[in-house]
Image (cartoon, rainbow, N blue to C red):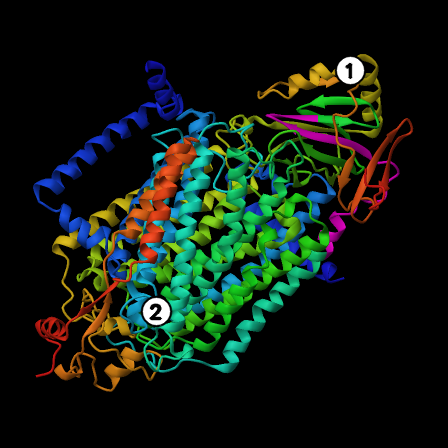
Amino acid sequence: MPSFVSYLIHTLFPPSVRLPDILLIDVGLVFGIIGIVVFLTKTGRWGSLWRDWLTTVDHKKIAVMYLIAALLMLFRGGVDALMIRAQLAAPGAHFMPASQYDEVFTTHGTIMIFFMAMPFIFALFNAVVPLMIGARDVAFPRLNAMSYWLFAMGAALFNVSFIIGGSPNAGWTAYPPYTGLAYNPGPGENYYFLALLIAGLGTTMTGINFLVTTIRMRAPGMTLMKMPMFVWSTMVTSALILFAFPPLTVALAMSLFDRLFGSSFFTLAHGGMPMMYVNLFWLFGHPEVYILVIPLFGVFSEVVATYSRKALFGYPLMVVSILAIMFLSYGTWVHHFFTMGAGPGVNAFFGLSTMLIAIPTGVKIFNWIFTMWGGRIQMTTAMLYQLAFIPTFVIGGATGVLLAVVPADYQFHNSYFLIAHFHNVIIGGTVFGLLSALYYWWPKMFGMKLNERQGRWAFWLFFIGFWVTFTPQYFLGLKGMTRRIYTYPAGFGWHQLNVISTVGALIMGAAFVVLVYNIVWSLRFGERDLTGDPWDGRTLEWALPSPVPEYNFARIPVVHERDAWWAMKQRGQSLAGSLRAEDVHDVEMPKNTPIPFLIGVSFFVMGFGMTFKWWPIAIIGFIGVILCLLFSGFDYDDHHHLKADVIRNTEASLGRLQG
Amino acid sequence: MFHQWVKRPYRKLMLVALVAGLFSAGCGQQYVMLDPAGPVGKSELHLMILASIAMAIVIAIVFVLFFYALIRFRDKPGNTAPYRPEWDGHKWLEIVWWVLPAVLLTVIAIPMVKTTYALDRIPKAKDPVVIDVTSLTWKWLFQYPGQHVATVNYAVIPAGEPVLFELTANSPMNAFWVPQLGGMEYTMPNRVLPLWLEASKPGTYWGRSAQFSGIGFEKMMFNVKAVSPAAFQAWAQNTHATASPMTMQDYKQLLKFNTVGNATYGGYPQDTFPTVASGFTLTGSGMYTIEHNKNGIKYLPMTMSTNR
C-alpha cells in the first residue's frame, strides 16, 4: 500500500510540478474551488448552474461559456508570455529552470491558438451568426453543445498538466522525434496530443455545424450575396476547419501511437519519418492561421461599415477575395519549412503561392479604407481596434511577404524576425479583431455597453504595448536571435532590445488588467442597452432586443437587401413595430440535455487515463462515451414547443408587440 | 537583367537606411543578417532589401490613403467632407488594387525564383571541401570525409571557395545556421540534406542551432573558422597526423544527452554518417549516393534499381 501511494505521488507530482510557484498556484486553486463550492451552496445555485448552463443547448449561452473560457485562457497564456519575457530580460538569467521555460513557451503557444483564439472565435459565431441570418438556433444545437464541452474538457485536460504530471515541452508544433519517448518520457506530450485530439473533435463538429447553419438556416430572401460579411467569413472558416483538421488529427494520433503503443511513424529509430509529421502538421497549420484571421476579417467588415455609417465597399470583391484566400491557403503549407531540403522547384512554387495570397488580402485592406472614404467615422473603442488593425496588419503582412521570399526565409526562419511577424499578424489581426468584436457585440450578448472611457484606456495600453513588445523582436531576428532559446550570453547585442520587449509585454499585461476591470465595472454599472440597437447597426442582430430572448425572432424576418436592418430603418420599418399578436405562433425549440456535458466528462476521464497509461480508467471513460452516444442516438425527446402566449408576453414586456 | 537595373538605386537606399537606422544603435556589426561574409548570405540580403523596398511602397500607399480617410471623414460637427452612405463600389479603383500588388509581387517573384535555383547549385569547383555535419544532443559533430579528421562544436573551412555541408541528425531535429555565411538548413534523422556556403575572407563566424531540441538546446553554438586554403590543408594534415582518432567509444560518449566543449580528432569510425543522401545540389536531381574511397568521395545519382 505505501508503495502504491509513493507510486501515485511520484507519477502525478514529479519534481517538475513541485516548483514553488506551481505549489503556490495549487494552494490558490484548492481555495478557489472550495470558495466556488461554498458560494454555489450558500446561494443555492447548483440547480441553476445545471439547468441554465451545463445542460443548455442555447447558442447564446454557449457563446457566453466560450467567451469566459477564452478570457480565462487569455489570462493563462498571457501569464506564460510574461514569464517568457521575464526570463529573456537579461543575458544568462535563471528566472526559472530551463525545463520549466520549455514548458512555458509550449503552453503559451498552444493555449493562445487552440484554447484562446479558437474559442473566442466560436463565441462570436455562436453569439451572432444565428441572429444575423434570422434563425432561431444553429442547425444542430445538441452537437453545438457537444462541441463546446469537448473543447472545454480538452482545455481542462491541457491545463491540469502543469499541476499534475508535468506540462508538454516540445513547442506548440510538437515536432518529432523530440516528442518521442526516447527524448520525452514524461506524460506532458501525452497531455498535448490527447487534449488537442479531444478539442479538435469539438472544433471539427463546430465547422460542420456552422457550415450547415450558414447554408441551410438563412431567413427567406437572404441569398448568398445578401449575407453579412461576417456570415460569409463564418462559412469560409467552417469549410477551412472541415478540411484542415483531419490532417492534424492524423498527425496527433500517429504521434500518440508512437508514444503509447510503440509504433514508429515518426521516431528516430526504425526508419521513422519525422518529416511526414511536419507536412501533416502544416497541412493543417497553414489553413489554421486563416481559420484564426478570416472570422476577424468578417468582424472588421461589419465594424467598419457600422461606425463609418456607410455600406461596405466592394462587397462582391470581398467575397471573391475571401474565397480566394480559402483556396490558396491549402496550397502554401511548405513555406513553414523551406529549410527542410525540398528542391528549388518545390520551394519556389510555395514561395509564389504564398505571395499570391497577399493579393486578395491586400484587396480587402483597400476595400476597408474605401468603406471609410465618404463615411462618418465614429471613434468608438471597437472602431479604434479596427483603425489599429489596418496599419498593423499591413506591416505584419509585408514582413510575411519577406518571409515568403525563399532565400530570405533561409535566414529569417526560426529567428525572432519570424516571431515578430506572426505576433504582428495574429495579435494585429486576430486579437485586435476579437477585442473589436467584444466591444461591438457586448451589448447584444449582455444587454449593456462596455464603458468606452475605460475601453479606450485598455486599447491604448494594448496598442502601445504591442508595438513596444514586437518591434525590437524584428531587430533581434536580424541580430540572429533564434526562437525558444532559454537564455543567451552577453555580447551578441541582444540585451537592450530584449529589455524593451519585456517592458512592452508588461504594458500589454496592464492593458489586460484594465480590460478585466472594464468588463467587471460595466457588468455592474454599464449603460443598459434598451433599444437593442446601440450603434445604429446594419445587420439583423440589431433588430432584436438586448439581451436576445431565448427564441431569437418572434417572427422570422424576410430579407430583401444586403444590410437588411439598415434598409428597414431607412424605410421607416422595424421588426418590433410591425409585430402583430396573430403573427406569433408556437415555436419549436431544442430541449436541454446533459449528454454533451457528460460526453465531455467521459472524454476527459478517457484522456486522463490514457495520459498515464492507466487503462482501466481510460476504458471507463471510453464506455462513458459509448453510453452517451447510444443514449443520445435513441433519445427522440429532443425538443419542446414554446407557446405563442409566452412569446407574446415576452415581446409585450419589451414593448415590441403592436397594439 | 531586371536584377541589374534595380540593384544600383536600392543599394544606395539600403546604405542610407542601414547607416541611419542601425548604426545609431551603436552596434551595426551585430546585425548578422545584414552583414554577410559570403556570396550566399549576400544574395539572400539582396532579396531581403528588394522585397523590403517593394513592401515599403505598399505600406506607404496604404498609410497615405488610410490616414487621409481617417482625418477627412471623422464624424465631427462641421465636417464638410461629402457623406455618401450608399457608395459601395468603383470598378476601376478595384481593378487598380488587384493589379498594383500583383505588379509589386512580380518584381519580387522573378529574382526570388532565380536565386532559389541558384542557391541550390554549388558553383563549379573541383572537389569542394565536404563536411558531414551531425547534430547530436546537444552538440555538433563535424566530419571531414576528404581529410579524415573530425571536430566537435567548431569547424574549419577554406575561405574563398564553396564548401558543401551534408547535414544529418542523430538527435531530434536541429537547424544548422551560420548567419553571416548564409541561411539555414535542418538536420533530420534518417535524411542527409546538402547546404553550400562560402566565406569570402578569413574570419570566425558564429553559428547555432535554430530549431529547438531540448533543455540544452541554447548551448548548441559553434564557430566556423575560415582560413586560407593553404592554411586549411595544413590544418587538416597536421590534425590527421597528430590528433588521436575518434573511436566508436568516443562516438558513443558523444551520443549522451549533455553538452561538451570543443574537441578535435585525427580520424573517425566509418558508419557514423549515413551514405544515402537526398538533395539537388551537385547532381541537379533527386537522391544520390555518397561513395567514400581512397581517392576522396564520389556522388553517384541513384536510380530505383541501385536502391541499397
Question: Which residue reaches farthest bottom?
Answer: A571
Q: Which of A630 and A463 is in front in this view?
A: A630
Q: Name the residue under label 2.
A: A302
Q: Is mark 1 on a helix, strand or loop?
A: loop
Boundaries of the magenta span: B114-141
Q: Which chain carries label 2?
A: A
Q: Quadrant of the C terminus of chain A?
A: bottom left
Q: Can residue A216 be seen at all in this image of the molecule? A: yes
Tell me: A213 left or right of A43: right
Question: Which residue reaches farthest right?
Answer: B295
Dot 2 amino acid type: Glu
Dot 1 amino acid type: Pro
Queried whether the magenta region covers residue B130, the answer comes back as yes
Name the residue: 40% across, 55% down.
A430
Q: Which of A205 and A319 is in front in this view?
A: A205
Q: How many marks?
A: 2
Q: Name the residue under label 1.
A: B245
Q: Quadrant of residue B166?
A: top right
Q: For the residues marked 2 and 1, what is the alpha-carbon distance in whole angstroms?
A: 70 Å
Q: What element carries label 2?
A: helix
The answer to whether A405 is drawn above or below residue A179 in the figure is: below
Name the residue: 54% across, 51% down.
A247
The answer to whether A480 is drawn above or below residue B14 in the figure is: above
Q: Mark 1 lies on which chain?
A: B
Tell me: A306 left or right of B262: left
Q: Horizontal and vertical percent for residue B24?
A: 52, 42
Q: Horizontal and vertical percent for residue A265?
A: 60, 39
Q: Can residue B24 be seen at all in this image of the molecule? A: no
Q: Nearer the viewer, residue A365 or B140?
A: B140
Name the residue: 38% across, 73% down.
A216
